[in-house]
Amino acid sequence: MTVTDRVPMSVRACSQLDRQRHARPQGRDRYTISEVVDYTGLSAHTLRWYERIGLMPHVDRSHTGQRRYTDKDLDWLDLVGKLRLTGMPVADMVRYAQLVREGDHTFAERERLLSAHREDVRRRIAELHSTLDVLDYKIDIYAARRRASEGV
Amino acid sequence: MTVTDRVPMSVRACSQLDRQRHARPQGRDRYTISEVVDYTGLSAHTLRWYERIGLMPHVDRSHTGQRRYTDKDLDWLDLVGKLRLTGMPVADMVRYAQLVREGDHTFAERERLLSAHREDVRRRIAELHSTLDVLDYKIDIYAARRRASEGV
DNA sequence: CGCTTGCCTGGAGTGCACTCCAAGTCTCTA
DNA sequence: TAGAGACTTGGAGTGCACTCCAGGCAAGCG
């Protein structure tokens, strides 16, 4: 048996709050890629890459071929950002995007997909809590020793 | 500003419970690599790799050069496993291992390192909870539509 | 008109954390 | 004692999620 499970990676991620310090320019509904960069915190590279791999619904273009994102696109990117933060693999998100494109008859499968992921997230929260206990324990020990040596 | 934050990856990880379904063979204190594989759920490749990169304290060898792990090594691997599950980068864990090797005068820095990581973990738990809300919301919608279409 | 700035593309490169390979040595069981 | 299976090494390969690059187009400005 090999280890097939993937490992979570560091998330020193900007929090949701950080990432959205730039509000949506109101009411225009035709955002340039750099506006979306400011809004989402994703790089322009990443936004184009999301499109290439099918993680974005079709993005509108200006008459010269530049991308123009809508509010709906930003909503979608909000969701993708959430799922990304919980560690859903990009491939799964692409699958979900596909189901959305296919229309209403995929509701059941979308529900299954999200439910499975929700279980993952719950499991992960439990794991994190159990690690928190270990960290608390270790930190207490170090803190106690430090206090002892400082107080002489 | 580019996105410098890393993203969590999928953790369909065996839970702690799964990973330790194989108990420590009691009292021998000289485990072969395959026993450690069973105990930790890590692959032998990974165990050797951990050693190469300095993430393990020195591991004992048999007279013919095969690895013999002690209970202390298993304890260390338990801790590493916990940190790994919380997404601490391997480089940080290596740094921590280094500090441990250097002795008691590194207590303060070890405490700092773990405390910083604890903050990361807390932040992540909060993020996961907020995503859970979004998932609940979406799933409710799908479930409601499914019920509506099933009931006709 | 030239310059800067922003955007476009396909494809190559990066960093992380493994994961595997080849070729040889050791250990255990029948 | 023979053969299967476990263990050893350095180095190469893999998969994921970006990240960057070269080369080019389009708009605005002095």
Image (cartoon, coloured by chain):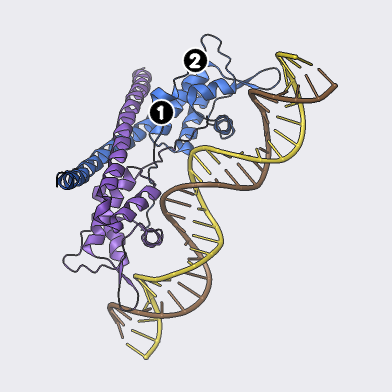
Chain colours: A blue, B purple, C brown, D yellow
Q: CA distance from mark 1 to mark 2?
A: 17 Å
Residue at figure coordinates x 31%, y 79% from the top left:
B63
Residue B65: mark in rendering: none
Residue for badge 2: A24
Q: Is residue B93 left or right of residue D15?
A: left
> In the figure, is residue A29 to the left or right of B106?
right
Residue B99 image position (x, y, % from top left): 31, 53
Which chain is indicated by disc 1?
A: A
Element under disc 1: helix
Residue at x 45% of width, y 28% of height? A80
Name the foreground residue: B138 vs B24. Answer: B24
Q: Residues within 10 Å of mark 1 (few under 14, many from 20)?
A: many
The quadrant holding residue A147 is top left
Which circle, 1 or 2, is nearer the viewer? 2
Q: Residues within 10 Å of mark 2 (few under 14, many from 20)?
A: some
A96 is higher (above) or lower (below) than C27: above
Instruction: Check disc 1 and report the residue beneath it.
Output: A82
Q: Amino acid at mark 1?
A: Lys
The mark nearer the N terminus, 1 or 2, is 2
Disc 2 residue type (three-letter):
Arg
